Image (spheres, grey):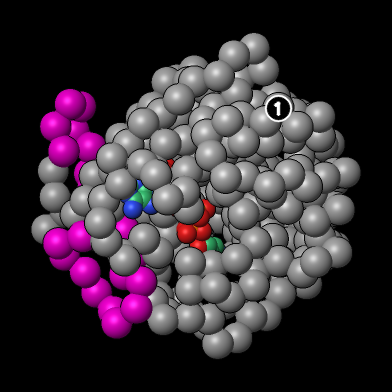
Amino acid sequence: MIPVLTVAGSDSSGGAGIQADLKTFAALGTYGMSCICALTAQNTKGVTMVVNTPVDMVKAQLEAVFDDIPPRAVKTGMLSSAPIVETVADFLSSHGKVPLVVDPVMVATSGAVLLEEEAIQSYKEKLIPLSTLITPNIPEAEVLSGLSIQNEEDMKKAALALMDLGPSAVLVKGGHSVEDARDILYDGREFHVFSGRRISTENTHGTGCTLSSAIAASMARGLSLTEAVGEAKKYMEGAIRRAAVDSVGHGHGPVHHFWFYGENWGHME
Ligand SMILES: Nc1ncnc2c1ncn2[C@@H]1O[C@H](COP(=O)(O)OP(=O)(O)OP(=O)(O)O)[C@@H](O)[C@H]1O
Ligand SMILES: Cc1ncc(CO)c(N)n1
């Protein structure tokens, strides 16, 4: 088995957060584990309540996992508060070098705020410098870099600026762009553009969580960073395409997870 860990928040409706991450890990043939940093009462229409996990419990979950089943890759999602970001960063910095994908989740697709303002500084100072890859969407890249992003050139400038925070690579996701869903990867040496046709659908709940989990799972399986992003983008596209024609809920429906059999996509039914 190939163990992979998500450190993130729970989404009661199962479309984003820990639940999306575990579905993605399973679909990509890895063994998913979780450290739950916050509980959200949430559905496709919005978030009605958030409770943060006590930091001692965050640490205890990480210790329990690493003590028994060291993950081959870790991803972080909703970390909610500065003390949680710092607890996770302190723990990971003292537990060797494992590929770390940091998805700096700030706001849900529905518009709910998922990160306290003070935590942004903790991301910049403590967690991002440890990361193999950060995966901000356009608004997150703007907040972290302080730059305004209007087009692909701006996405590249923001990616370079974010490299100054110390990650090994940056993926600026284009899901929020008005153009095609093109994601820009800067791998520390050069840019790679991952193009995707924009799929016309409101059902994009969980896209960011799914993409970062798919990258972590692919890296755990031994793919290089650029290969992992390519595979994740392919998985993502299938998951959104299916969600466009097969949805649940009354708001932004969740992406639809697939099983991956080598080159063939199969629908889970
Ligand atoms: N309508 C769409 N059609 C095709 N690809 C999309 C669409 N929306 C998002 N994507 C892709 O999904 C991935 C996630 O991107 P996005 O920018 O939406 O992340 P996010 O905002 O962090 O997600 P979330 O809404 O879950 O927080 C990217 O690869 C992006 O290009
Ligand atoms: C728990 C959780 N994590 C991440 C997101 C981002 O979409 C969400 N909506 N909920």
Indicate left or right for 115 with 206 as reference. Answer: right
> Does residue 266 lie above or below 257 as drawn?
above
Quadrant assignment for the C terminus? bottom left
Residue farthest toward the front in the current orientation of the protein: 150
- The tally of labels here is 1
The residue segment tinted magenta is: 244-265
Q: Residues within 10 Å of mark 1 (few under 14, many from 20)?
A: some
- The front one of 222 and 149 is 149
Q: Secondary structure at mark 1?
A: helix
Residue at 17% over, 26% down = 263
Q: Which residue is mark 1?
A: 160
* Residue 32 location (% of width, % of height): 46, 48
- The front one of 160 and 94 is 160
Indicate left or right for 269 with 63 as reference. Answer: left
Q: Quadrant of residue 204?
A: bottom left
Residue at 36% over, 41% down = 180
Q: Is residue 224 magenta?
A: no
- The front one of 186 and 35 is 186
